[in-house]
Image (tube, rainbow, N blue to C red):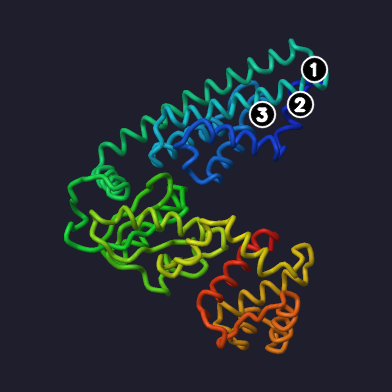
């Protein structure tokens, strides 16, 4: 149904519905009000915010929220309960996002000359709609909480959360306090997707999985093999720590979360050993120092020049493949002579050799090059 010609507030909202700037500001407002909501992946908040904004618009056009819109509100409430976000915390985020959206619409409406009476009527209608949505969200959240509280699984998940947060808690089945487990962390927050991966992780051996801090985490006795779906190179990024007893996994969880952020920023996927991400994790935590190093070693490169970014990417691949031409060429899908030419031009522009075994301190100099290239490419947007 098309909005009436005099419903200028509704037209204003329609124009703003797909405004990415307003959507991102609304997401930031919701995350800024609630620490627990902010702990969730940003895309999770963005997905629900977009759905609710479109739902409010549809309800304004139709006169009341449809069953589809109310069902979306129920899913939000249920998901937050299963992610361990208390009802008060997620309502704080919801109300902060709603308040920001309304303020932005009213301010823009006044700039465009929309009468105050029309703005007041529109805000009142939005409040009526969001009140109905909040009732559904709270009800679904409480139902989900009660369902989880009745199950043995929730008790096990609570134990998992306490162990990963370093709390002293009795270690019960299915874990053995004397056994050692790999702590696996991921960025998966969708309960349905997480559930499918849980089954794949625990199929490899005894373990316990669940959403901790809004993301899938696990303690497993054996990691999936490289050909198993949970560890495939095209699957979601998973970081696995060395085995430790349940009472000693909290430091591994904290390190795994840091490595996960660094690996995600580097575009990695699949199952990764925490030890293999040690350098990436450490350097990712010091971006300013990495920037200084890039400025010192790569001053001859222009980040706005595509060819220079190509040279830097080739140099990084060259280091990642042990300074060997053919493996680097295979990884980049180019001829070996192309790699040789790019490395030569890179060294001419930077005024330094990528490798010089006779100069001493070869390991630290190679690490410095690797760190500088990673940071330079990140800063250049490559």
Q: Residues within 10 Å of mark 1 (few under 14, many from 20)?
A: some
Residue 57: numbered disc: 3
Which corner quadrant of the image does residue 49 belong to?
top right
In what element is the residue under mark 1? loop
- Is the residue 191 above or below the residue 248 in the image? above
Residue at 62% over, 21% down? 126
Percent of width and height locating residue 63: 65, 21
Percent of width and height locating residue 102: 65, 23
Q: Residue furthest top?
A: 117
- Is the residue 177 above or below the residue 92 in the image? below
Between 208 and 274, the one nearer to me in the picture:
274
Residue 114: numbered disc: 1
Q: CA distance from mark 3 to mark 1?
A: 18 Å
Earlier sequence position, callout 1 versus callout 2: 2
- CB under 8 Å between callouts 3 and 1? no
Q: Where does label 2 land, which residue?
A: 12
User: Horizontal placement of 53 versus 10: left or right?
Assistant: left
Percent of width and height locating residue 319: 58, 78
Q: CA distance from mark 1 to mark 2?
A: 9 Å
Viewer-nearest of discs 2 and 3: 2
Residue at 34% over, 58% down? 252
- CB under 8 Å between callouts 1 and 2? yes
Percent of width and height locating residue 182: 31, 63
Q: Residue furthest front?
A: 359
Q: Residues within 10 Å of mark 3 (few under 14, many from 20)?
A: many
In what element is the residue under mark 2? helix
Residue at 23% over, 44% down? 152
Which quadrant is the C terminus positioned in?
bottom right
């Amino acid at each position: 149904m098309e909005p009436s010609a005099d419903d200028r507030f509704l037209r204003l909202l329609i124009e703003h519905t797909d405004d990415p700037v307003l959507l991102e500001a609304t997401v930031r407002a919701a995350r800024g009000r609630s620490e627990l909501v902010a702990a969730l992946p940003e895309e999770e908040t963005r997905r629900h915010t977009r759905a609710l904004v479109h739902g409010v618009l549809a309800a304004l056009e139709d006169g009341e929220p449809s069953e589809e819109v109310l069902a979306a509100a129920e899913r939000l409430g249920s998901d937050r309960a299963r992610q361990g976000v208390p009802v008060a915390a997620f309502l704080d985020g919801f109300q902060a996002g709603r308040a920001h959206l309304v303020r932005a619409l009213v301010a823009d409406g006044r700039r465009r000359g929309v009468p105050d009476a029309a703005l007041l009527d529109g805000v009142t209608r939005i409040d009526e709609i969001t009140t109905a949505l909040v009732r559904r969200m709270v009800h679904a959240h409480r139902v989900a909480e009660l369902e989880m509280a009745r199950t043995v699984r929730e008790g096990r998940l609570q134990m998992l959360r306490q162990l990963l947060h370093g709390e002293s808690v009795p270690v019960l089945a299915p874990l053995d306090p004397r056994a050692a487990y790999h702590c696996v962390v991921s960025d998966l927050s969708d309960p349905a997707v997480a559930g499918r991966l849980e089954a794949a992780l625990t199929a490899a051996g005894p373990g316990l999985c669940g959403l901790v801090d809004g993301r899938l985490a696990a303690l497993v006795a054996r990691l999936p093999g490289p050909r198993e779906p949970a560890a495939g190179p095209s699957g979601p990024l998973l970081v696995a720590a060395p085995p430790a007893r349940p009472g000693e996994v909290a430091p591994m969880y904290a390190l795994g979360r840091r490595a996960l952020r660094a690996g995600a920023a580097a575009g990695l996927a699949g199952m990764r050993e925490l030890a293999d991400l040690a350098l990436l994790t450490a350097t990712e935590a010091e971006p300013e120092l990495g920037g200084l190093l890039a400025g010192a070693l790569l001053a001859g490169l222009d980040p706005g020049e595509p060819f220079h970014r190509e040279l830097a990417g080739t140099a990084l691949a060259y280091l990642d493949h042990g300074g060997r031409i053919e493996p680097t060429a295979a990884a980049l899908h180019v001829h070996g002579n192309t790699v040789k030419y790019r490395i030569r031009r890179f060294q001419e522009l930077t005024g330094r050799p990528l490798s010089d075994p006779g100069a001493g301190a070869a390991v630290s100099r190679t690490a410095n090059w690797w760190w500088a290239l990673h940071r330079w490419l990140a800063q250049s947007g490559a």
